[in-house]
Amino acid sequence: MNEGTDGNNLPEVTFISQWPPDNDETESLTKSHKRKIADIDQEQPDNDPYEKRNVTTHANSSQNSSCDVDDQEHNFLWALPSIARWWRKQVAKEKIIYKGVTDSAVVANTKLKRILKRSDCQLFIEETIQKLQAVKQRYELNAHYFSALASFFDTRGDYTEALNLIERSLQIERRSAKDLSFKEFLSRYALQAKPVIITDAVCNMISTPWTFEHIKNVAGDRKAAVKRLIPDSVEWARLEIARSMTVKEFVNNMDSPSNFNDEQLLYLFDWSLPLNCPELASELTIPKYFASDFLQRTPKGILYHDSWPSLFIAPEGARSELHIDAFGSNFWMALFQGRKRWLIFRREDLPLLYPSYFNSLDGTFNIDLSSNDDNFLRALSLCKPRECILQPGELLFVPSGCPHRVENLERSIAISANFVDLSNYHRVVEELEYSSMMDNESKVLLSVLTDSKFSTRMNSQQDNLAWKDFKNWQSLKSNYDFDITLDNIKNFNLSVNATES
Ligand SMILES: O=C(O)CCC(=O)C(=O)O
Ligand SMILES: [Fe+2]
C-alpha cells in the first residue's frame, strides 16, 4: 500500500476491490460495483438495488435461505459503492458542479479518490463506520459484514484495522479439480489444515446422476434410523435418533412447512453406504485427493473400515449443530442436490467455543452461536471462522479438528467420508490413544494403524479410484510407487514448492 501524501495529509488510497479474498462472491460484488461507479455522478432511482442491498441479518438470511453468491440482497454494502451512492445524492441535492470532480473527464475510480479527500466524505465514512460498529454483535459470524467494515477502514487509510477485519471475512477458497493436483492439495490444504471447495470433481464421481428418484430406485426399501436436532441435546452435533423408516418413506415425506421446529425436521444423516446399500456405493469413484485413505488398508471388520462414504438427505432447514468430527479424522463431502451453508472454525478456535465433554471424548458445544452473552461474544470475536454456501456439484474438504456447523438451505443429497492419511495420521493416533482407554474397538484400530507392518505410504501421483479399486488395497499396493512417507511428509511442502518454482 502506498503511504504517500498529496498535500492534504491524506494517504493514497488502495481500494479494497484490489484485495483478496478473490472468489465468486467478491467478484460478483466487484463487477456490479464497477458497473455502478461507472455512472458515479448520475443519481439512481429510488429503487436502486444498492439502496435495498444494505444490511440484512444473518438470522434473516438463514430463515429465508436465499443468501448465495448470486443474491446480493444479503451482502453489506462496501465502501466504494456506498460512497458513490452518497456522492450521487450530494450532486443531486446540491445541484452544483464540484470543481475538480464532476467537471472532469477522469475515470470513476479517480473521481472516487478525489471525493475521498473531501471533508464531507470523510465525515460520511466516519458515520458509516460508527453505524456498522453499532450492529457488530449481530453479525459476529457474517463474513460480508466484516469485509464491508474493513473496506471503510481501508478508505480511511486505517490499514491495520482493515487487515484485522478482513481476516474475519475469509471465504473458503474454490479450486477446480482441472488444475489442482493431488500433491498441491496435500501441501496447500490438507497439511495446512485449510478447508477448500473443489469444483469439477463431483461430475467424475458418478455416472448416473444421484437424484431423489435414483436413490429411491436403488435404496428405497432399506431401513434408516433418521435423526432430528434437539436444541439442548448433549449428543454430537445435537442430533438424536428420531425413528426408523425406509429411505423411500423418508424421501416421500420430506416436508419442511414453515411452522415446523427443529425437532420436527427429520434428517437422514451419515447413513453408511457400504453397510446399508453397497449397490449405491459401487457406483462411486473416489476423488484422488481422498483415495489414499488408510482406513481402507485395515482388515475387514475393524472400526470404520466400512463406515463411509455415507449418505445425507435433508429437508430444507435441517441442520447439524457445531461439532468436531471424531478421532482426528479429515472429512470430505460431495453435494449432488441442494445448497448447504457451512461455517468452519480453525482448530485454534476450539478453546474459544466452550467445548464440553459431557459423555464422550468427541466434544460437543453448549453454546448458541447466535447468543448475545458478552463473555461468549468476546471469545467469538477472536475466532476466525470461514463460511461458504456449498453448491450442487461441489466437493468440500474439512481438515481434522476444525469445529463446524451446517445448515441445509434447500432439500439436499450429499455423500461424505471421514478419512485418515499422512496429513492427519499423528492426530488420529493421538486421539485413538485417548479413546482406547474406554473403547476396545478404538484400541484395536490404534494397534493396526501403528503396527510396524502397516503401510503409511502415499503415492504422489495418486489418481481417482473406482469403488472396487478403492476397496482393494491388496492389489493397489503392488501396482504403484508409494513415494510419500511418514518421514518425508515433514518436508513435503518444501519439496512441492521447490518443484513447482
Ligand atoms: O451435512 C451435514 O449436516 C454435516 C455433515 C458433517 O459435518 C458430518 O457428518 O460430520
Ligand atoms: Fe462434521
Image (tube, grey):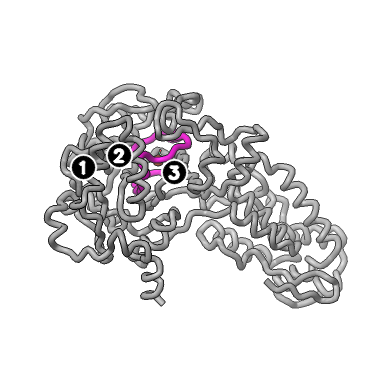
Q: Is mark 3 within 8 Å of ligand 1?
A: yes
Q: Which residue is mark 1?
A: 280
Q: Earlier in the sequence, mark 2 or mark 3?
A: 2
Numbered range of the magenta stretch: 311-338
Q: Is mark 2 within 8 Å of ligand 1?
A: no
Asked if residue 35 shows in the view, the reply is no
For badge 1, the amino acid type reads Leu
Out of 491 and 268, give the one closest to the viewer: 491
Place of residue 290 in the rendered image (x, y in percent of width and height, measured from the top left): 30, 54
Which numbered marker is on residue 468?
none
- Does 45 lie within the magenta span? no
For badge 2, the amino acid type reads Leu
- Measure the alpha-carbon separation of dots 1 and 2: 10 Å
User: Image quarter for residue 370?
Assistant: top right
For badge 3, the amino acid type reads Lys
User: Image quarter for residue 196?
Assistant: bottom left
Which numbered marker is on residue 311?
2
Q: Is residue 500 above or below residue 492?
A: below
Element type at mark 2: strand
Q: Residue at x 81, y 76 (%)?
A: 6
Place of residue 461 in the rendered image (x, y in percent of width and height, measured from the top left): 26, 66
Q: Are marks 1 and 2 in contact (CB under 8 Å)?
A: yes
Extreme residue toward the top, this view = 243
Characterize the local packing of mark 3: few (<14), some (14-19) or many (20 or more) Cα atoms within 10 angstroms.
many
Q: Is residue 345 above or below residue 14?
A: above
Place of residue 482 in the rendered image (x, y in percent of width and height, measured from the top left): 22, 63
In which quadrant of the rendered image does the C terminus lie?
bottom left
In which quadrant of the rendered image does the N terminus lie?
bottom right
Characterize the local packing of mark 1: few (<14), some (14-19) or many (20 or more) Cα atoms within 10 angstroms.
some
Out of 446 and 385, give the one closest to the viewer: 446
